[in-house]
Structure formats: structure tokens, C-alpha cells
Image: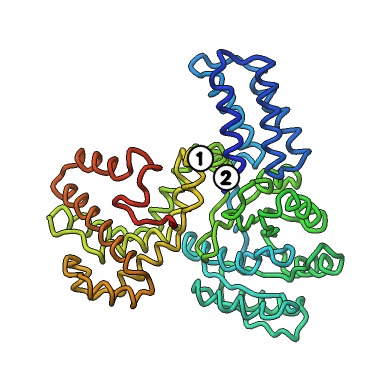
Amino acid sequence: MFDNLTNRLNRTLKNLSGQGRITEDNVKETLREVRTALLEADVALSVVRSFTSRVKERVMGKEVNLSLTPGQEFIRSVYDELVETMGGEAQEINLAHQPPAVILLAGLQGAGKTTSAAKLALYLRERLRKKVLMASADVYRPAAIEQLAVLGQEVGVDCFDTDPTEKPQRIVARALEQARLKAYDVLIVDTAGRQAVDEAMMEEVRDLAQILDPIEIFFVVDAMTGQDAAVTAKAFGDALPLTGVILTKVDGDARGGAALSVKEITGKPIKFMGVGEKVAALEPFHPDRIASRILDMGDLLSLIESIQRNTDQEKAAALAKKITKGKGFTLEDFKGQLLEMKKMGGMSSLMDKLPGMGNLPDSLKDKIDDRRIDHTIAIINSMTPKERAHPELIKASRKRRISMGSGRGVQEVNELLRQFTTMQKVMKRFGKGGMGKMASMLKGLMGGGLGGGMGGGGFPNLFGR
């Protein structure tokens, strides 16, 4: 996420780190590079101009902190301004309304409104413990209603039975009535989109807003459209009383232009961002955490929250107890850890939140492949329970059977078994209380750093060949 912007800013800010002090000249040169980096990230020109101007004011208009180097001082100013540009503090979803609180989703076709409706419904059900009803008012796009119904089943949220022959205005009125009668806390309404902004679409969505009186009207926009996202958001904001933005496909946005442009151009906060295709891949938008990611300082708070939310604490405690008692770490245990990683968005999502990932060589970044987790799980699933508990039993004939059952090559089976043997040694030392020894071994497995052995140490090989 935002890889291009992160890399360019890192190179630019490193150039300042060797300077003895901040001067008008080196600030001017560095800001020129920052301006170029932002423009290449497809940030709106007006935002770039105001951003660099405010950074200069921050750097030159205050006393320099003597405990910081010029590079650190400049980075702190850039960080502070990134946070402000993206909205300052995180904005919570507003449900302060007599139930049902109505949330209306608007946006262009293909932006991800229907998927976002389901993701938001799951977020409200799981994290805020709300009883949610979803309704589709999109009677134009083929299978739009069926898509929402399928997603509703997947996330465990009720979906209003929409009649595609009815007018959208009639559909939302009936959905609202049902939400009231059945005591739902929240009604999420997915509206129709168009290929471009047109008056007919705006008129219809205005009608729906008038009928529903929503507490939140979210504009859903594809992050990969760059600064065009902000321009389209402004057009919708002029037609509707928007309360916020949901930025989708952020995981595929290497530039970051939309995230940095939307708030300043529209005046509306980004409240959520979609970070993957899975229905659980929706995160509240925290400007300070995103600024940290852009500057390659990581996002450990989001990582910790993700671990706490997706890890089965009882299973984790049971595994730790089992290992400390010397009962061993099995392939079944390993599979469980991989499934937990998948729930957190896979290796790429975890790495995105770790500090210093921008220093990984491009050759290694390009090889990160979360499909390797699925391949490894498939190999383990093709083993018998006895083989998972005692992998030393797996010889040539068993390897061929496991290879055929999983659809993976015998070489991959061998690779997994070799990695797992190394992991067992690590866990055995952990079980004996040798935390220092374990740390040393992990360092060795990683080849003294993330770039040294991610694909061949005691961790699953998630990198393509």
C-alpha cells in the first residue's frame, strides 16, 4: 500500500539526514523532491501546493528541537502535515439515531459499494454488536440484488427481499419499514451506480436520501483512481449531504493519491478503507497510522488490534501450554497458525504494518505471494492425522501421495517438511524456556534480517521462485 510514495519519500528524506542543520536552501531542495513524489503519487495539484507550503511553515517557522537531527525534524513536520491533510483524528461512525440508524452508500459503478455494504455490516455486527439489515436499491445492474444476498449469507447478516420490478424509492421505503418492525439497529442501503456522474443517478439517490433520512451517507470510491477519486467525491458532495468516504481497494493502491486528496478537496473525512477482497478486510481510517505507513514507520497499533481480533486466545494459550510442557509442535498446529495469518490478511498485510518494510529490496517485495499460504495448507490437508503428528513417517511414497492430493509438486512437500523441522527446533527451545536461545535462532533463520532468509528459514515460504 502506497509503496511508490513511501519509497520516493524515503529516498528524499534520507538526503536531508546528512545535513548539519536546516536551512532555507536544503529545505527548498527537499520540498522540491517531496512535491515531485506527491505528484507522481497522483495527489491533486492543489493539495500538493498547500501541503508543501504548510510543511515549509512548520519547519522554518519554529525553533528546532535540539534533540533531533535536521532529517528527523523534517520527517516529523512531514508526518504532522500528512496527518492533518488526511483529516487529523479518526472519525467514528455515527449511529446516534433512534433505531434503525440508516447508512446510505453512494458512488460510481465498480467502486465496490455492494462489497463495502457487506464489509460494513460485518464490522457493525462483530465489533459494535449491532443487529443489521442490508437492502439493495440497485435494480439496474444484473445480479446486484443476488450479490448482496449471497454476501449477506457469508457475513451472517439479514438481507431485505428486494423485488427488482419495483422502483428504488418503493424498495427503500419497505426496507425501512421492515427494519423498524423487526427492531434492527442499523439499515444499510446499497444504491445503483453509473459509469459516470449523471443527473438521473443523482436525482434518484437524492430521492432515496429524502425517504430514508440517513444518519450517514458514505461516498464509496476506488482508491486506485487517484486524484480522480477526490474530484468525483466532490461532485457527489455537491449533490448529497455526504458525511464521509469509504476508500476501497487501498491494498492495490501503490500511489496513495486518493487518500491524500479526498479530505482536503471534499472536506469530508475518510471513515473506512477496504484493504482486501475478503469480507473482513475493512478497517477504520486512522490518519496518524496511515501517515506512519507512508513514511515506512509501520502501523503496530493496527497490527496488534488485528492480532487480538483474529486470534483465538484460548487456542493460543493451549498451544503455548502444550509447547512449554514439551509435547511438541505438530503440522496441525502449524496449519492453525497459517489460518490465523490468513484471517489477518496474509503475509503482505502483516508486512505492510511493520516498520522498515520499505528497506526490503524490490526483488524480495515482488516475490511476496499469499497464495503460498493456501498451497501449504493444501499440502498439510493432504496428510493423514498420523502424518501431521509424526512427519518423520513421510517418506518417498507418502510424499508422492501428498503431492497428488494437494496438487503441489513433491519438491514443495520436501520444502515444507524441511521448514517445519526447523520450526520444531525453535519451538523445542521455547518449551525449555530458552527465550534468549530462541531469539538467536530466529535471527539466524532470518539471515540476520528480513532480506536474508524469509523463504528458506523457519517460516513458511511465501515467496515465489
**Mark found first going from the N terminus, 2 or 1:** 2
Q: How is the image coloured?
A: rainbow
- Name the residue beneath numbered marker 2: 3
Residue 145, horizontal then vertical, whole percent = 65, 79
Residue 275, horizontal then vertical, whole percent = 55, 56
Residue 86 figure quarter? top right
Mark 1: which amino acid?
Gly
Q: Quadrant of the C terminus?
A: bottom left
Residue 312, horizontal then vertical, whole percent = 33, 61
Left or right? Give the position of 255 relative to 199.
left
Left or right? Give the position of 418 relative to 211.
left
The vertical placement of 39 against 237, above or below, is above
Residue at the right extreme of this rendering: 199
C-alpha distance separating marks 2 and 1: 8 Å
Q: Nearer the viewer, residue 431 or 140?
A: 431
Residue 456, horizontal then vertical, whole percent = 33, 51
- Name the element at disc 2: helix
Which numbered circle lies on residue 437?
Answer: none
> Which residue is found at the position 58% from the left and 51% from the top?
92
Q: Nearer the viewer, residue 204 or 452?
A: 452
- Name the element at disc 1: helix
Mark 2: which amino acid?
Asp
> Which residue is found at the position 61% from the left and 55% from the top?
94
Left or right? Give the position of 203 relative to 417.
right
- Name the residue beneath numbered marker 1: 358
C-beta proximity under 8 Å, tags 2 and 1: yes
Residue 50 figure quarter? top right
